[in-house]
Image: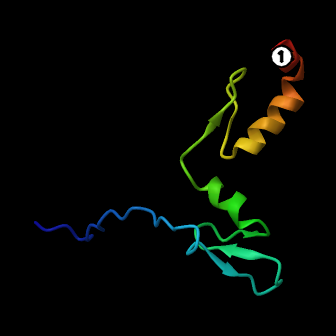
């Protein structure tokens, strides 16, 4: 007997390029709306990296970050004493 519910084909999440990921936000000329998550951001480059699989891993704890500058800030704030030893 055939199933009453049609199976939906599996669709992979849309992967946008940097240039196609954002549209101008209607509320402000300084903001951009992300097509992937809907968030409004002022810095497209930083937000684009939040959607990538590449992670920057802290060498001293389990923390991981989508951006290297955020990892550097974490290291200065949380592991300053360890950094001074090197």
Give me the residue at 29% from left, 66% from top. Answer: 9
Q: How many marks?
A: 1
- Residue positioned most to the left: 1
User: Picture coordinates of residue 73 (x, y %)?
Assistant: 83, 38
In the image, residue 80 above or below residue 47: above
Lateral position of residue 69 relative to residue 48, left or right: right
- Residue positioned most to the bottom: 26
User: Picture coordinates of residue 7 (x, y %)?
Assistant: 26, 67
Instruction: Tell me the quarter of the picture where residue 43 sits.
Output: bottom right
User: Picture coordinates of residue 66 (x, y %)?
Assistant: 65, 46
User: Picture coordinates of residue 81 (x, y %)?
Assistant: 89, 17
Which residue, given by chain and number where applicable, does mark 1 sit on? 82
- Residue positioned most to the top: 85
Give me the residue at 58% from left, 73% from top. Answer: 19
Quadrant (top left, top right, bottom left, bottom right) of the C terminus: top right
Instruction: Tell me the quarter of the picture where residue 79 sits.
Output: top right
Quadrant (top left, top right, bottom left, bottom right) of the N terminus: bottom left
Give me the residue at 79% from left, 76% from top. Answer: 31
In the image, residue 10 above or below residue 4: above
Give me the residue at 71% from left, 68% from top. Answer: 39
How packed mark 1 is, by other alpha carbons closer than 10 Å (few <14, some 14-19, many 20 or more), is few
Q: Nearer the viewer, residue 38 or 70?
A: 70
Tell me, what colour scheme is on the image?
rainbow
Tag 1, which secondary structure?
helix
Q: Nearer the viewer, residue 72 or 28?
A: 72
């Amino acid at each position: 007997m055939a199933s009453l519910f049609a199976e939906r084909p599996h669709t992979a999440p849309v992967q946008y390029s940097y240039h196609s990921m954002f549209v101008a936000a209607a509320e402000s000329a300084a903001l951009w709306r992300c097509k992937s998550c809907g968030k409004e951001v002022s810095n497209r480059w930083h937000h684009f990296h939040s959607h990538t699989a590449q992670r920057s891993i802290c060498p001293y704890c389990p923390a991981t970050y989508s951006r290297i500058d955020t990892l550097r800030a974490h290291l200065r704030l949380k592991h300053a004493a360890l950094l001074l030893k090197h």
